[in-house]
Image (cartoon, grey):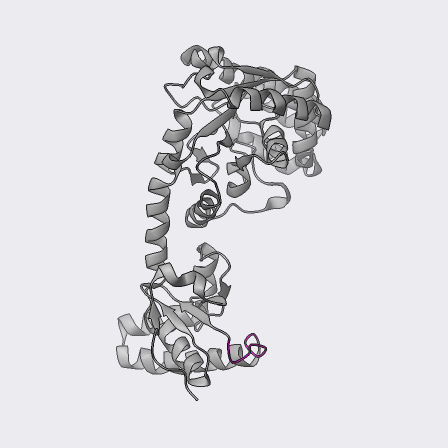
Amino acid sequence: MAAKDKDRIVPLERMDEFDAIIDARSPAEFLEDHIPGAINLPVLDDTERRIIGTIYKQHSAFEARRLGAAWVAKNLARHLQERLQQHPPSWRPLVYCWRGGQRSGAFVTWLRMIGWSAAQLAGGYKTYRRWVLERLAELPAHFSWRVIAGPTGSGKTRVLQALERRGHQVLDLEALARHRGSILGAWPGGEAQPTQKAFDTALVAALRRFDPSRPVFVEAESKRIGLVQLPEVLHEAMRLAPMIVLDTPQECRLQLLLEDYGWLGDEPEALARRLERFKGFVPNETLRRWQELALRRDLATLFAELIARHYDPLYRRSLARHPELVQAPRVRLTELDTAALEAACGEIEAWGSASELLPRPSSAAASARPP
């Protein structure tokens, strides 16, 4: 017996009531961004959607709907035979498309005819995206931030990871962005960055897990991390937050870079091409030398020169422009092993519990980025 039409269209606030969330949009739309946890069961694939759109605009809306209906029926039949076979009569899915229109409506109609209490998300993904932007505009101001700063290779990410293991709230922006924020900061293995929309979605999901009564630790970042940008409200909150600077010996910094960026040496020619991005930042003679070092896989010399001739001068200029970095509490990280990271965390915890001792910087002074 068909499910009743009650609650066929539901608002975003009721999303958690359902057993599953189905994204009925095309795979390309889903890849750009989607509601966390949603599964993609497209009623039209990318090619079909493009063809239908062309027919609708250039020929006939009727012909587009007729052909589209046939393809939708075909795709729905496949989903019912494959991905949806195992669900019991009590299963309750929520379906959305771009605006909560024909694609999700057709899907919900078939599911309800079968007997499942399926519902359609009012406004579709467009409404969800608006909700994400609203959350990004207000959530960051709810938290007490603690910013971990320091020069290239000082171990900021490792300290954040150690703080998280100790039970602290940590926002790892580089992990969400799948990028380390610098010219050579691409994620290992060639993993692509998320789209801006997907980054925003992941950021909201992370922020919503935090307890406003406890501080949140974050690494100093510029406004852009690779191809994605931080929301203005979050960047401003970090800019004004108490800051703690890591003081790490040069040999430890080089060791860290070799451990974290050694994968760049697996493809010397690709690394030499990547170094072209420093053109205009360093003399051409220096750039050519760095490319020769890359081709010889001499990463130790290359990274040492990147620190000495590019990143440390950048950091010193930042110190000159922002004296609050000099005045900020400093935590010595003498090694990269567990004991040293734990000791650094202990010092940070002591400073973090006495926030009145931490100067509030007057401008965004993100540390120089690793290669």
Q: Quadrant of the C terminus?
A: top right
Viewer can see residue 25: yes
Q: Looking at this view, name the residue that lies furthest to the bottom.
A: 1
Q: Residue placed at 35% from the left, 35% from the top?
A: 233
Q: Residue placed at 63% from the left, 30% from the top?
A: 158
Q: Is residue 151 above or below residue 18?
A: above
Q: Nearer the viewer, residue 321 or 269?
A: 321
Q: Residue placed at 48% from the left, 11% from the top?
A: 326
Q: In x, y percent, where is residue 239?
A: 40, 25
Q: Quadrant of the N terminus?
A: bottom left
Q: In x, y percent, where is residue 30?
A: 46, 60
Q: Quadrant of residue 362?
A: top left
User: In screen coordinates, is 298 left or right of 63?
Assistant: right
User: Is-magenta flag for residue 63?
Assistant: no
Give the magenta range. Answer: 83-90
User: Is-magenta flag for residue 86?
Assistant: yes
Q: In x, y percent, where is residue 236?
A: 36, 30
Q: Quadrant of residue 63?
A: bottom left
User: In screen coordinates, is 261 left or right of 64?
Assistant: right
Q: Is residue 241 above or below residue 121?
A: above
Q: Is residue 284 above or below residue 323?
A: below
Q: Nearer the viewer, residue 168 or 96?
A: 168
Q: Main secondary structure of the magenta part?
A: loop
Viewer can see residue 293: no
Q: Residue placed at 42% from the left, 78% from the top?
A: 72
Q: Nearer the viewer, residue 321 or 297?
A: 321
Q: In x, y percent, where is residue 215?
A: 48, 31
